[in-house]
Amino acid sequence: DLTRDIVDKIQYTMQTVTEVKELPYKPLSEDALKMVAALILFEKGNHCHMIMGLFHQLASSKQTESEATYHLGACADTLGMQQAAFDHLSGLVAKEDKEFAKDALTLLAKDLPGIYEVPFYKTLKAAKNPKALITDQSRDDVTYRMAKGAYRAGDYKTSSVWALQVSDKADFYDDARFLAAMNSFALGDKATAQRKLEELYANLEARKVPNNNIRALTAINLARMNFANKKYDKALERYMQVPKDHALWVQGLIEQGWTQLALEDYAGAIGNMYSLHSPYFKAVYQPESF
């Protein structure tokens, strides 16, 4: 229970209040107010079609240029305007903008369309300190896109370096390993390329990877390498591993026909070619089958 004695025993510590010094008030500029309004709508989502014009206007102002350019690129990406997204975001990466280059690179590298892989590679390659722009979040996306861009640009050694930096946690880790093998082949080291592909296919089998695209690419390239080395029996085995529901299956079956001819399996070869002329494949362009 609360008593008078308890209250009297309370010791109060008095502190001297420091003098408050008022600072001058600096109102937000008109551009800053527009930026705040645009950012509020951006954060709410699904408003990019309304605010892109505002961001475009703010991008021409020195005070808001970088921030507006980034969000303009982000909005373009959201709306599927790929060229506009690439132009705005890559510009920030190219000038290594201190505040927005890292975010721009992260967004740019994620799901980058193949047509922009070479420009992406050239943009980052030209940067003074490209590694400083890569974050833990963007590392796998960036290294994979750089590897693909370098390969398309014919810079196979650089492509190999970037491909090997893709971690095994990435969704496209197997694709990066395949690309590393193709770089070895492009550099003339065919034995290493074949070894890498053999290791990749064995690993795909061991992990029971359901990705038919990487299986098809690996199998058909191994088949072609074995065919070039006149190891027709091994080539035939690999051609038969191309998944039947993949776009490469028809091409693989035609190449398998040539392999069967080399093995003097004429009945098998002509049987496969007759199969391709069934009504099921009437829409497929296959002149070599004749």
Image (cartoon, helix red, strand yellow):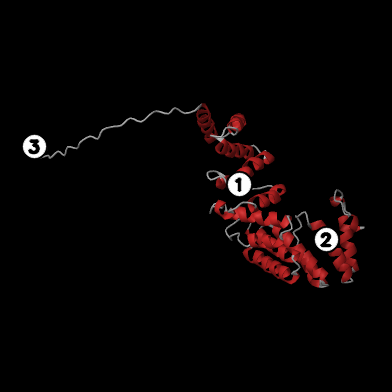
Indicate which label's residue lies in the foreground, 1 or 2.
Answer: 1
Q: Residues within 10 Å of mark 2 (few under 14, many from 20)?
A: many
Mark 1 and mark 3 residues within 8 Å of each other at the beta carbon: no
For mark 1, what is the residue? 93
Residue at screen point 62% across, 51% down? 127
| Classed neighbour count for the residue bearing mark 1: other residues with Cα under 10 Å, few (<14), some (14–19), many (≥20) | many
Q: In this view, does 230 lie to the left or right of 73?
A: right
Q: Seen in the image, is 162 located left or right of residue 14?
A: right
Q: How far apart are marks 1 and 3 (CA)?
A: 68 Å
Q: In which quarter of the image is the C terminus?
A: bottom right
Closer to the chain start, of discs 1 and 3, is: 3
Q: Which residue lies furthest to the right in this view?
A: 290
Which quadrant of the figure has residue 203? bottom right
Q: Check the picture and name the quadrant holding the N terminus.
A: top left
Coordinates of residue 233 in the picture (x, y in percent): 81, 72
Which structural element holds mark 2?
Answer: helix
Residue of label 2: 253
Q: Residue at x 89, y 68 (%)?
A: 261
Q: What residue type is labelled 2?
A: Leu
Residue 200: name its quadrant.
Answer: bottom right
| Three-letter amino acid code of the residue under disc 1 | Val
For the residues labelled 2 and 3, say whether their Cβ atoms are less than 8 Å apart: no
User: Is any part of residue 212 visible from this angle?
Assistant: no
Q: Where is residue 36 in the image (x, y as percent from the top left)?
A: 50, 31
Q: Which residue lies furthest to the left in this view?
A: 5
Q: Circle 3 sits on which residue?
A: 8
Disc 2 to disc 3, C-alpha distance: 99 Å
Earlier residue among tags 2 and 3 = 3
